[in-house]
Image: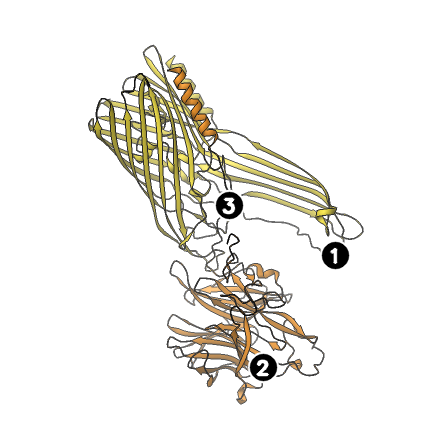
Chain colours: A yellow, B orange
Amino acid sequence: MVSRLAIAALALGVFAAPAAATPPDTHGLFSRSISLGGAVTADVEDSSANYYNPAGLVHSGELRLTVGYLNVSPFLNINDERSSVERHGAMLVGLVAPATFGDARFAFGLALHLPDQRIARTRSAVVTRPRWEMYDTRPGRIYLATNVAVSPVPWLTLGAGITFQSPSELTLDIRGDTHALSPESRSRLEHQFRGDLTSIRYPQAGIQIHPHEMFSFGLTYRGSFELRNRIIALADANITGIGAEPIPLAFSLDADTTSMYGPQQVSVGAVFEPTSRLHFALELTWYDWSKHPSLLADQEIVLTADPPPGLGITVPDEITSLPPLPLSLHDTFVPRIGIEVGVIQTPAYQLDARVGYVYENSPFPVQTGTLNFVDNDKHTMTLGLGFTMSDLEPTLPGQLRIDAHALYSYLPEREHIKDSLVDAVGDYRSEGHLFGAGVTVEVAFE
Amino acid sequence: MTRRAIAIAALTLAFVACATLGDETAFPDIIQTSGVGPFRLLDATENGGLAAPSGRVLFSREAVGRAMMAEGFLFYPRAPVVDEPPERDPDLPEGVIDPAQVEPFALFRGTPREVDGDDVLEGAVSFDGGSMVLEATEAWEGESLTDPWVHVGADGTARLYYAAEGGIGVAEAGAADGTFTKVAGPVVTDARAPSVVTFGGETLLFFEAEGGTLGLARSSDGLTFTEESRDLELALAGETALHAPGALVATTPTGRTVLRLYFEAVNAEGVTILSLAATEDLASWDRLETEIGILSTVEDARAPSPFLRDDGITVLLITRQSDSRGVELRAICGAMAPANLSLVPVLDIAE
């Protein structure tokens, strides 16, 4: 049975579509893990294991239902002016459901990140408008991950699963006659619109090893993904009101864009617990950003019209657009540190305090050329508290856990000095801060 | 336990169902620090509501030419149309005033139109005609003075560089609003359209040389110039002439000091556009290969003269097609970049 499940889990990973960068990549998932700086790969066991390490789902053997909320407010500036980047808030829901078959323990997990402003957001990149690429649209979409985990022996847990994302294809088709002088009252146009939100999947898998009660180790792989958005606009119309005969006009736009890309990533972490009250965690994550495709649209525009020669209307032979320039990102290694201290421990309740630190060096180069995808290095400091109530029977046969976190990210100033003094944008400086907070409530049934 | 779990799950779903309440956020703002535009013509709130052509900053029924702003004043050449103007010389290129149709030019100093008078808002670029500050008196000057360019030194002394028949002359005053007295000339011969800036500790004088090239002369005192080049070789392939340089020294947000030179470029078909070149060291120049911004749709724009405000907005004075009594003249107009900003306070509808 174990081997069958393992094969099934492996198959999910092998046959899933290429995978993704997600909202949890940017802001984390659930308060305890965020407050430890995300350094939880080695020992995570709550619902956040669905992102950080699915192997941890099976560790506690508890049925866990988790709900939470997080908010991150960006204060990002370019040339000392506040950039138009909206706050990110999201509802979080998680599930860990254990099961046993013989001597082997299993668990199923699910995590949902649902933005509170919109279900998904895609905005095309305007090359001449500097955009905070990591914070503009990237976190603003649904994240749904499902995983299974197994513990074949007490010191080893394995987990794998898939995450879902949705690309889109939109088609607008316009036909009919339009009047050049009175388009609103004398045009006869009809249009059709079609939108397809399809689904792609990408894998994640992990392992946790607990060789000794004072040590644990973890390894997680998250696959890459690429969300493409395709917009097709077709117009086949006659322009009337100019001259005696209608002027046939045909226009087609086919724009194929990578709206979001998530690099494959590997996290390796270790936890050291010298006492039951003290917990040190270290972690390093590799992000394969160098494979990031261009975010500029690969588009084809065709315009055909045959105006009478006397009108002086010139139809261009060819409409060109900027080619999909490479972003030239580089891989990054992100270190994370987390410390948890048991402040109060009694049979009825427990209070833990947590701190964490993450340093994320930006994969984006200084924007010296045509592109203007702004990103800075980021130092993130986190704080958190966890309160666990254990003696709740008969009301609750288990534990109630309330975790809260606060985070502050500092993005030190970065200068973007253009190669050309007549660049369309020119030099600029980027810097900023992020402030975030959140809370998670979890019910764990024994 | 199962019932409690179901109840908690139902509560969670209800919570989630209420979660997605979106609002709209604007696209990233336009950031533009290189001075290449897109420029847009000043609107009616920014030019005091002056009449057409769009962007006009000075109303005049007389002939005017290339203007520049210094210390809040508008320096420009002006000449009355002759009483009975002859037919325009058909061989003159578009945008050039027929000298036979106007009296000799003198230099004028326009004053800002009064704020709150005639709907002029704080920050607007709008001028009254003002008074004459200089006219041709020297033999080498001929009859007309044109192309004024005022350069104010660190001590507040204002030097007025101007073009005349024999070259470029200099007048001086204690301040931009003072009385100008001629002190030197011609400091560069066979040249017109002077534009003077301090760059790298030197006074640089850009000028238009005979034959349609842009030249450069250097000075340590602003009065004695050494010609360095009569052709900075800024023309692109296919361009036959460059005219009317207007220089500007800017410090970018990253601390780079950049000299920008706006000018007219004429191609083989005789089409004139406004373009830009920039340098950090005067040894190498980056040349904009296209027209500057939205002004490409304003085909009659000529004689660019830049002015950098403290808030980073570049105001570009230009001349546009105008006429009076059937005589083809020019009008002094203004454009600005970044185009999404405003020279005047934007009215908040919510207020």
Q: Residue at point 54% right, 37% down?
A: A229
Label 1 lies in what chain? A
Q: Are marks 1 and 3 on the same chain?
A: yes
Q: Considering the image in quadrants, where does the C terminus of chain A appear? A: top left
Q: Residue at point 59% right, 76% down?
A: B64
| Front position in the image: B111 or A9 | B111
Distance between the alpha carbons at the discs numbered 1 and 3: 36 Å
Q: Considering the image in quadrants, where does the N terminus of chain A appear? A: top left
Comparing labels 2 and 1, the label whose residue is closer to the camera = 2
Percent from the top left, x then y, of residue B199? 40, 70
Counting residues from the N terminus, which is met first, the one under dot 1 or under dot 3? Answer: 3
Label 3 lies in what chain? A
* Residue holding disc 1: A311
* Residue type pointed to by label 1: Leu
Q: Are marks 3 and 2 on the same chain?
A: no
Which image quadrant is residue A253 in?
top right
Label 2 lies in what chain? B
Q: Please tell me whether mark 3 sits on a helix, a strand or a loop.
A: loop
Please say if B126 is above or below A45.
below
Please say if A126 is above or below B181.
above
**Residue A125 got which mark?**
3
Q: Please tell me whether mark 2 sits on a helix, a strand or a loop.
A: loop
Distance between the alpha carbons at the discs numbered 2 and 1: 41 Å
Please say if B205 is above or below B165.
above
| Front position in the image: A325 or A409 | A409
* Residue holding disc 2: B105
* Residue type pointed to by label 3: Ala
Disc 3 residue crowd, few under 14, some 14–19, many 20+, Cα 10 Å: many
Drawn side of residue A38 relative to residue B208, left or right = left
* CB-based contact (under 8 Å), mark 2 and mark 1: no
